[in-house]
Image (tube, rainbow, N blue to C red):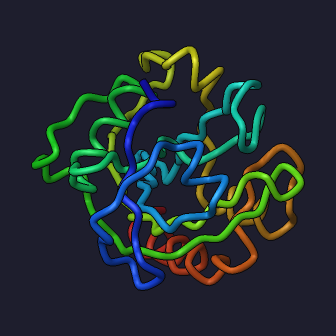
């Protein structure tokens, strides 16, 4: 259960403290913790998969977001969490060892949401998964997390981020340079 799932508390430098807490405490106290961002890309077209978050999510309800994302549970590896979120949210099943799960980099993201009651201090491990000729109608969505998916070319999404398009989970102010880094990778690898 996501509400009772324990998440490791990290130091401001991203090191394990040996303590963990449930999700609600992690966010009410603003503890540093680890998350995964998994971007699904069709390497033939440069299209990315975005998911629309469920309207009952505490953060960014009804907004378009990264292909799959989530917290890293206590004692779980980042790769295992990335594979798990991808499978749960989109039905794309990979093992944590699968070479298609390509780690890119880690960045720290700070959000203060819901009038200061939701403090998100996440070390985000960013992954890219290439799925050639991706047909999004074949994806199996996790109903309590994802209400729909769509494909968008990475250059169009970059412009939407720059223009702060409403209905899109925008990068936190402190992490824009990391999104620049990610989109530079997309531009170098995909048409």
Residue visible at 54% across and 54% down? Answer: 26
At which x and y percent is residue 91? 36, 23
The residue nearer to you, when weighing 119 against 190, is 119
Residue visible at 45% across and 62% down? Answer: 33
At which x and y percent is residue 53? 67, 32
Tally of numbered discs: 0
The residue nearer to you, when weighing 108 against 16, is 16
Judge from the rendering whether residue 138 lies leftward or rightward of residue 129; answer left or right.
right
Residue visible at 80% across and 70% down? Answer: 162
At which x and y percent is residue 19? 34, 61
Relative to 87, residue 27 above or below: below
Residue visible at 52% across and 75% down? Answer: 108
Quadrant containing the N terminus is: top left
At which x and y percent is residue 102? 26, 60
Judge from the rendering whether residue 108 lies leftward or rightward of residue 113; answer left or right.
left
Judge from the rendering whether residue 82 lies leftward or rightward of residue 4; answer left or right.
left
Residue 18 picture quarter: bottom left
Relative to 117, residue 133 above or below: above
Relative to 167, residue 133 above or below: above
The residue nearer to you, when weighing 109 against 105, is 109
Residue at the extreme left = 97
The residue nearer to you, when weighing 140 against 111, is 111
Judge from the rendering whether residue 139 lies leftward or rightward of residue 102; answer left or right.
right
Residue at the extreme front = 19
């Amino acid at each position: 259960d996501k509400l009772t799932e324990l998440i490791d508390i990290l130091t401001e430098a991203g090191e394990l403290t040996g303590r963990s807490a449930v999700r609600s405490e992690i966010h009410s106290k603003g503890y540093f913790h680890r998350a995964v961002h998994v971007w699904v890309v069709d390497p033939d077209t440069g299209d990315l998969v975005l998911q629309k978050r469920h309207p009952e999510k505490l953060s960014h309800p009804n907004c378009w977001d990264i292909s799959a994302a989530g917290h890293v549970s206590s004692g779980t590896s980042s790769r295992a969490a990335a594979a798990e979120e991808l499978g749960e949210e989109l039905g794309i099943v990979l093992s944590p060892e699968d070479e298609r799960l390509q780690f890119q980099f880690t960045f720290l993201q700070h959000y203060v949401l819901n009038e200061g009651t939701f403090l998100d201090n996440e070390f985000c491990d960013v992954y890219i998964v290439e799925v050639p000729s991706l047909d999004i109608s074949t994806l199996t969505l996790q109903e309590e997390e994802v209400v729909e998916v769509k494909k968008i070319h990475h250059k169009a999404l970059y412009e939407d981020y720059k223009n702060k398009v409403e209905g899109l989970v925008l990068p936190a102010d402190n992490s824009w340079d990391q999104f620049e880094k990610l989109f530079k990778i997309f531009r170098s690898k995909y048409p």
